[in-house]
């Protein structure tokens, strides 16, 4: 007799699948990740995996969407907090950059992951950028200054620094921009 899955059980399985798939994509790359490996890492059958995604590209897109867009509500909360502007701006950076970087820093295929994401889902990447820009503008009070801040933030990543180095860079940048807010 099969057990009927509750909505909470279905969502927990989906999260487990997305986490397993993200790990595979970051460590093996898109081409070397198999759905069989994702199913194994998620401790589910391949049939159950197909209840969440049509194919590997669909799964990749879901991972990217979830990984980036799920952070925006938390970033918006940080932007609206009553803390000082420096603290709020750093919290936004922690949520939308440093937490992601901590996982990407150690992943051998992180650069490919990001490049494939940008190619497959440019509208999601743009929606995420716009959401982050709105959060930063909420703190800095000026959309143009916010855009300059985000461009500078992107520039901090060009040499793929360690998380510790990136954290220091972000603090310096936040101090420079939030000092005028």
Image (cartoon, rainbow, N blue to C red):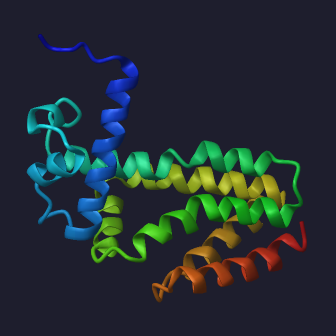
Expressed as whole percent of the image width and height from the top left, the position of residue 42 reads 23, 46
Front-lying residue, 178 or 20? 20
Q: Quadrant of residue 53?
A: top left
Horizontal arrangement in the rendering, residue 84 relative to residue 11 (left or right) = right
Decide if residue 152 is on the left or right side of residue 124.
right
Can you tell which quarter of the image residue 172 is in? bottom right
Question: What residue is at 81 percent from the left and 74 percent from the top?
Answer: 177
Q: Is residue 168 above or below residue 73?
A: below
Q: Quadrant of the C terminus?
A: bottom right
Q: Is residue 159 above or below residue 173?
A: below
Point out residue 14 in the picture as x, y percentages from the top left corner.
32, 36
Q: Nearer the viewer, residue 56 or 168?
A: 168
Q: Residue furthest top?
A: 1
* Percent of width and height locating residue 28: 19, 68
- Residue shown at the point (38%, 76%) measured from the top left: 106
Residue 123: x %, y % from top left: 41, 49
Total marks placed: 0
Whether residue 137 is visible here, answered yes or no, is: yes
Quarter containing the N terminus:
top left
Rendered residue at 52%/52% (across/down)? 128
| Quadrant in the picture for residue 52 | top left
Q: Is 45 left, or right, of 101 in this rendering?
A: left
Q: Which residue in the rendered view is the most extreme toward the front?
A: 1
Q: Residue at x 49, y 70 (%)?
A: 101
Res. 56 in view: no
Q: Is residue 103 left or right of residue 146?
A: left
């Amino acid at each position: 007799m099969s057990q009927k899955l509750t909505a909470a059980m279905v969502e927990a399985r989906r999260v487990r699948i997305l986490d397993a798939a993200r790990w595979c994509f970051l460590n093996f790359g898109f081409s070397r990740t198999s759905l069989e490996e994702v199913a194994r890492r998620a401790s589910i059958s391949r049939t159950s995996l197909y209840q969440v995604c049509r194919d590997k590209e669909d799964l990749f897109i879901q991972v990217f969407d979830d990984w980036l867009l799920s952070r925006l509500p938390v970033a918006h909360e940080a932007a609206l907090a009553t803390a000082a502007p420096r603290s709020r701006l750093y919290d936004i950076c922690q949520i939308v950059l440093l937490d992601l970087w901590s996982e990407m820093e150690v992943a051998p295929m992180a650069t490919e992951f990001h490049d494939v994401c940008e190619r497959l889902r440019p509208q999601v990447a743009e929606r995420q950028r716009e959401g982050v820009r709105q959060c930063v503008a909420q703190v800095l009070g000026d959309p143009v200054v916010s855009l300059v801040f985000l461009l500078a933030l992107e520039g901090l990543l060009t040499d793929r620094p360690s998380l510790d180095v990136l954290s220091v860079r972000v603090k310096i940048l936040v101090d420079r921009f939030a000092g005028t807010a």
